[in-house]
């Protein structure tokens, strides 16, 4: 396998407190810590482990966003990616547009494997990997918790509602990662310094002839209603009476 392409996304850090904008147009990101999407970290870690086993020669990290997204690409390079590509856009990129952009990069870079997180923690759409596989007409293995490579194929153990399922995919293929696939490594200072010397290319979605304009409009974003405090009742009869009274009010 010559190349692995890994898609990563810049999102609000999972430890940060989420606040809705005053106008209800979205989530506040100003002065909020941002980081790489945790599921994408797992995808990148898996790509690095594959390369360390001698099963791949090059890892390409890709992200879509503004210039600020370069920071997650530098993190990816420090983790072990060989080069990085920023597809610069100034507007929100929705799943189908992201999949089309990634398809164009796949056709340009010709990797034998694409790995990405099963979902981004900011939108939780869980769509890009599936859409990309559909556009490429490649086999896909979603929610992967274990990978085993063979001559021209990969076995994917995936987590499903009923337990585990194993798929045998012929390469090239698209794989999305679940939490239990691995634990991303700690990035050392020498690797951070070395990452600054690795190539990072910036292109635009227009150069790929992809229209990245949003097609779905968000009408309003609101924080979930605060949970009401419970009431302690003395008996089952009190519970039944309360349920009847609340039903009448509704």
Image (cartoon, rainbow, N blue to C red):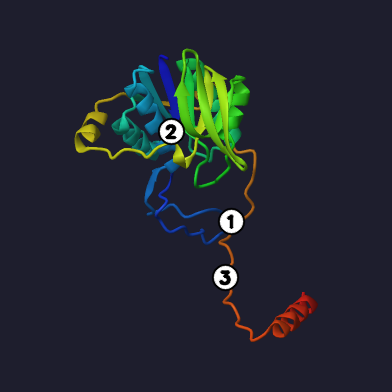
The disc, 1 or 3, on the residue closer to the chain's N-terminal end is 1
Residue 128 versus residue 211: which sits nearer the camera?
A: 128
Q: Secondary structure at mark 1?
A: loop
The disc, 2 or 1, on the residue closer to the chain's N-terminal end is 2
Residue under label 3? 227
Asked whether the beta carbons under mark 1 and mark 3 sit within 8 Å of each other, the answer is no
Q: Which residue is pictured at 43% across the width and 59% down the height?
A: 17
CA–CA distance in space, label 2 to label 1: 29 Å
Kindly identify which numbered label has been placed on residue 46.
none
Kindly identify which numbered label has been placed on residue 221.
1
Q: For the view shown, which residue lies furthest in the right direction?
A: 248
Residue 212 versus residue 136: which sits nearer the camera?
A: 136
How many numbered discs, if any?
3
Instruction: Measuring from the top left, give residue 227's x and y in whole percent.
Output: 57, 70
Kindly identify which numbered label has been placed on residue 43.
2
Left or right, 25 with respect to 28, comes to right
Instruction: Give the number of the mark in front: 2 or 1.
Output: 2
Q: Which residue is pictured at 62% across the width and 23% down the height?
A: 135
Residue 10 visible in image: no
Q: Residues within 10 Å of mark 2 (few under 14, many from 20)?
A: many
Report which quarter residue 133 is drawn in: top right
| Quadrant of the snapshot with the C terminus | bottom right
Q: Secondary structure at mark 3?
A: loop
Left or right, 182 with respect to 174, comes to left
């Amino acid at each position: 396998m010559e190349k692995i392409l890994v898609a990563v996304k810049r999102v609000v850090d999972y430890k940060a407190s989420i606040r809705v904008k005053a106008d209800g147009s979205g989530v506040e990101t100003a002065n909020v810590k941002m980081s790489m999407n945790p599921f994408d970290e797992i995808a990148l870690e898996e790509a690095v482990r594959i390369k360390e086993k001698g099963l791949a020669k090059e890892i390409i990290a890709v992200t879509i966003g503004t210039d600020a997204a370069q920071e997650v690409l530098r993190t990816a390079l420090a983790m072990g990616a060989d080069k990085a590509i920023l597809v610069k856009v100034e507007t929100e990129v929705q799943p189908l547009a992201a999949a089309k952009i990634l398809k164009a990069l796949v056709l340009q870079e010709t990797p034998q494997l694409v790995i990405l997180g099963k979902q981004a923690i900011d939108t939780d759409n869980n769509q890009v990997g599936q859409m990309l596989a559909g556009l490429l007409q490649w086999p896909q293995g979603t929610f992967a918790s274990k990978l085993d490579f063979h001559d021209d194929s990969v076995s994917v153990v995936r987590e499903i509602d009923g337990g585990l399922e194993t798929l045998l995919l012929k390469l090239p293929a698209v794989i999305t990662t679940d939490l239990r696939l691995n634990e991303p490594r700690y990035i050392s200072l020498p690797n951070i310094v070395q990452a600054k010397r690795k190539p990072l290319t910036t292109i635009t979605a227009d150069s790929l002839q992809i229209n990245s304009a949003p097609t779905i409009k968000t009408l309003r974003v609101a924080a979930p209603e605060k949970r009401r405090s419970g009431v302690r009742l003395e008996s089952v009869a009190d519970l039944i009476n309360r349920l009847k009274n609340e039903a009448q009010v509704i």
